[in-house]
Image (tube, rainbow, N blue to C red):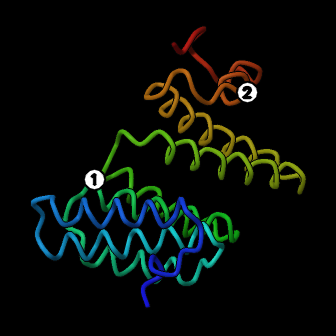
Amino acid sequence: MPRTQRNDNFIDKSFTVMADIILKILPTNQKAKEAFVYYRDGMSAQADGEYAEALDNYEEALRLEENPNDRSYILYNMALIHASNGDHEKALGLYQEAIELNPKMPSALNNIAVIYHFQGEKAKEAGQEDDAENLFDKAAEYWKQAIRLAPNNYIEAQNWLKITGRSEMDVFF
């Protein structure tokens, strides 16, 4: 039984019904519809903390999906799972792939920056000051890109950029 047919709460059931109606009326090909079903099931599994199942669904959606923008969101969600599981290198690669397909994805840019910042903090704790500074510089570059795309977001990152002297701008918005 597909995951979306197992939803127990009203909101999930409502979303599933609406998504099914939209799938039936939108002029998309069968492959795109199948990709969406896998993507939807992946999101549901991810929300339930069933990361292996979510990744399986996302991988199948990725195999079927041809639209670059839609593929970018599949990759983004896969990266979220890998990042939350501590596989930062895999997450970074997936975020990069997502950005290549959709360069206007500030959340992916922000998440890359967060990973680099985290790695910089770890390097600093280990006494690797040069490595830490390089990682902080990488984080800064990605945060600047994210802030340019979404100037009213990432206030903490904006403050960090100013405090650390990594901001060339006084105001981002």
The residue drawn where x is 28% and y is 73% is 35
Write the residue at 54% across / 35% down: 141
Circle 1/circle 2 CB separation < 8 Å:
no
Res 160 label: 2
Q: Is residue 56 above or below residue 113?
A: below
Amino acid of disc 1? Asn
Q: Position of residue 11 (x, y in %)?
A: 53, 59
Report helix, strand or loop for mark 1: helix
- Residue bearing the label numbered 1: 69
Q: Of circles 1 and 2, which is in front?
A: 1
* Position of residue 33 measured from the top left corner of the image (x, y, whole percent): 22, 71
Task: Residue type at mark 2: give it.
Answer: Trp
In the image, taking residue 136 as reference, residue 151 lies left or right, namely: left
Q: Quadrant of residue 143?
A: top right
Q: Provide the secondary structure element on which disc 2 rests.
A: helix
Which residue is outermost to the top?
170
* Residue in the foreground of this view, choosing between 106 and 92: 106
Q: CA distance from mark 1 to mark 2?
A: 31 Å
Q: Residue at x 34, y 59 (%)?
A: 18
Tag count in the figure? 2
